[in-house]
Amino acid sequence: MEAVAKLKKSFIAPRKMRLMADVIRGMQVNTALAILKTEPKKCAIHIEKLLLSAIANWQALNPSIALETAQLYVKTIYVDGASMLKRIMPAPQGRANRIRKRFNHVTIVVDNNVVVKGKEKHNDQ
């Protein structure tokens, strides 16, 4: 059974956040957490907390299955653009340039692999 965690209105540009989301998409949870802990980017901290929240949500949905035996992986992760703050910066000759400070929404879905007859099978099939 899959579990979802969402981060709303994070003050990092969606383009920067998508770089880290692309790195951990489809990975096992343990390796994804190891990568996020060692990554120096600021967005890695936010995604790490969100991934831990998704794991906790999965544990709440599946109390009978031990986390150590479950092979959790990041099923989907996507970053959507949110609202933006619009600011004005003075420019030469009395003009004004617009500055757009972008926000984003991040959604992570975590699922476990089930082994059936020697093959890995995802629960969504």
Image (tube, grey):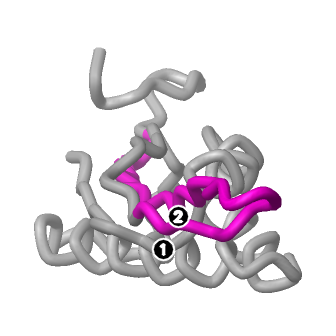
Q: Residue at image x 51%, y 49%?
A: 74
Q: Is residue 102 magenta?
A: yes
Left or right? Give the position of 73 relative to 58. Answer: right
Q: Nearer the viewer, residue 123 or 33?
A: 33
Q: Which residues are magenta?
A: 86-113
Identity of the residue furthest to the front in this view: 93
Looking at the rendering, which quadrant does residue 45 occupy?
bottom right
In the rendered image, the vertical position of residue 78 relative to residue 21, given as above or below: above
Which quadrant is home to the C terminus?
Answer: top left
Q: Residue at x 45, y 38 (%)?
A: 76
* Mark 2 / mark 1, whichever is N-terminal: 1
Residue assigned mark 1: 11
Query: 14 or 63: nearer the eye?
Result: 14
Q: Quadrant of residue 65?
A: bottom left
Amino acid found under the numbered disc labelled 1: Phe
Q: Main secondary structure of the magenta part?
A: strand
Is label 2 in contact with label 1 (beta carbons under 8 Å)?
yes
Comparing 111 with 17, the one in front is: 17
Residue at 49% across / 58% down in the picture? Answer: 102
Q: Residues within 10 Å of mark 1 (few under 14, many from 20)?
A: some
Q: Position of residue 78 (x, y in %)?
A: 46, 41
Give me the disc on residue 68.
none
Secondary structure of the residue carrying numbered label 2: strand
Q: Which mark is residue 101?
A: 2
Residue 24 locus on image (x, y percent): 69, 51
Residue 27, image x, y percentages: 67, 47
User: Is 19 contained in the magenta span?
Assistant: no
| CA–CA distance in space, label 2 to label 1 | 8 Å
Tell me the residue at 32%/67% (across/down).
9
In this rendering, the answer to whether 122 lies above or below 82 is: above
- Relative depth, front residue between 80 and 97: 97
Q: What's under tag 2, amino acid-wise?
A: Lys
